[in-house]
Image (tube, rainbow, N blue to C red):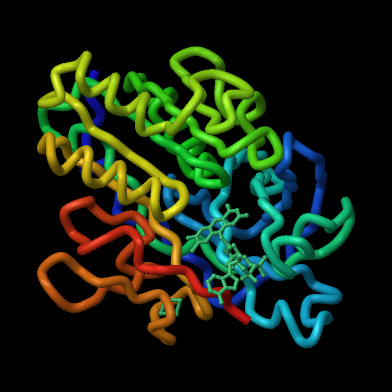
Amino acid sequence: MPADPAATPDRVQAPFGRRLCEVAETRPSGGYRIFTLIDPEGPAPAPGQFFMLAAAPDWAREGGRPYLPRAISHARFTRHPGSGQRLDFLIDEVGPGTSRLAEMKPGDQCWVAGPFGGRFSLPRKLNPQAAGAILVGGGIGIAPMAVLRRELVDRGIPSRSLLGFRDQAHSGGVEELFGCEETRLAFEDGSSGHKGYVTDLLLQLLEGDDSASAAVYSCGPPAMLEAVRRICLEREVPVELALESPMACGYGACFGCAVPKADGGYLRLCIDGPVVRGDEIATAMAGEPAVD
Ligand SMILES: Cc1cc2nc3c(=O)[nH]c(=O)nc-3n(C[C@H](O)[C@H](O)[C@H](O)COP(=O)(O)OP(=O)(O)OC[C@H]3O[C@@H](n4cnc5c(N)ncnc54)[C@H](O)[C@@H]3O)c2cc1C
Ligand code: FES
């Protein structure tokens, strides 16, 4: 039974202000780290939405960095009646903010604001002819793909996941967040799955399928997202991308997250995104300087 697109509001509204949440669990997963927060007050986030996180003690420590909270997508959420929800996050340590988040221990406190941004559309809303979804995740970008996949499974909508990584040291979360069914892997160093880019797998699928019935969703590094965007636009396959950009506030005030639109002007990724249609933007390579 196709789901009614009207049943999915564009976004879940964040409660006002930030709230303290406790770390329940933290564990390594490949080269990444997964940590779990208990969020007693927050609403259930939708696929594609993100949170602004800051560890409660020792946030501004190395020369004042990290100063601003960091935008992080949830990788899974689980409702627990009476105690709120468990939120899982997948972290790739690339700088002071993600390193501080990755070293939190059970019982530590973390400031949480969100969920922010808009959600991925369901396949029939993105493409009325869609027979299912193709999810293309790269690196840490597999986190929002895992949440979308879970929602599609719950709704009985077929999906196939294509996940790409540079090497084993820059991968993680696959076993825990994705089932092995309908999931294909690509490693650039050939250590597992297809040797090469995840976009090779996308091209194979689109060539084997009737691309008129495809709906593609993607999150990952800018170069991968731009490749996915071009592959889809060239074949007139509707595609939604979850983009990254430096985010200082998360609610539309600072314009730090602006990306150029295809028809001129800019959109603010924190409120107009992070999920955008591929034909809505001029490029997925808008650049990602670090935030303080
Ligand atoms: C909506 C959204 C969701 C996200 N979800 C996740 C997630 O689930 N998990 C996760 O780990 N991350 C996620 N990120 C990315 C994360 O928020 C950023 O990488 C963040 O800046 C990390 O902070 P940091 O202090 O660790 O690193 P930073 O010091 O901010 O560095 C971040 C990156 O920028 C590069 N960089 C540093 N300086 C410069 C410069 N001058 N010019 C260009 N590049 C530079 C670094 O090499 C590094 O790759 C998400 C971002 C967004 C916007
Ligand atoms: S992060 Fe401040 S406007 Fe988007």
Q: Position of residue 117 (x, y in %)?
A: 40, 62
Q: Which of 73/205 is in front?
A: 205
Q: Residue at x 37, y 42 (%)?
A: 218
> Does any portion of residue 116 appear in the rendered image?
yes
Viewed as shown, does residue 207 lie left or right of 19?
Answer: left
Q: Quadrant of ligand 2?
A: bottom left
Q: Residue at x 63, y 59 (%)?
A: 41
Q: How many marks?
A: 0
Q: Position of residue 213 (x, y in %)?
A: 15, 24
Q: Residue at x 81, y 45 (%)?
A: 26
> Does any portion of residue 8 appear in the rendered image?
no
Q: Position of residue 86 (x, y in %)?
A: 68, 45
Name the image quarter holding the N terminus: top left
Q: Which of 7/92 is in front?
A: 92
Q: Which of 98/107 is in front?
A: 98
Q: Residue at x 11, y 32 (%)?
A: 128
Q: Quadrant of residue 11?
A: bottom left
Residue 161, relative to residue 67: is it above or below?
above
Residue 273, relative to residue 265: is it above or below?
above
Name the image quarter holding the C terminus: bottom right
Viewed as shown, does residue 89 lie left or right of 110?
Answer: left
Q: Position of residue 280 (x, y in %)?
A: 18, 59
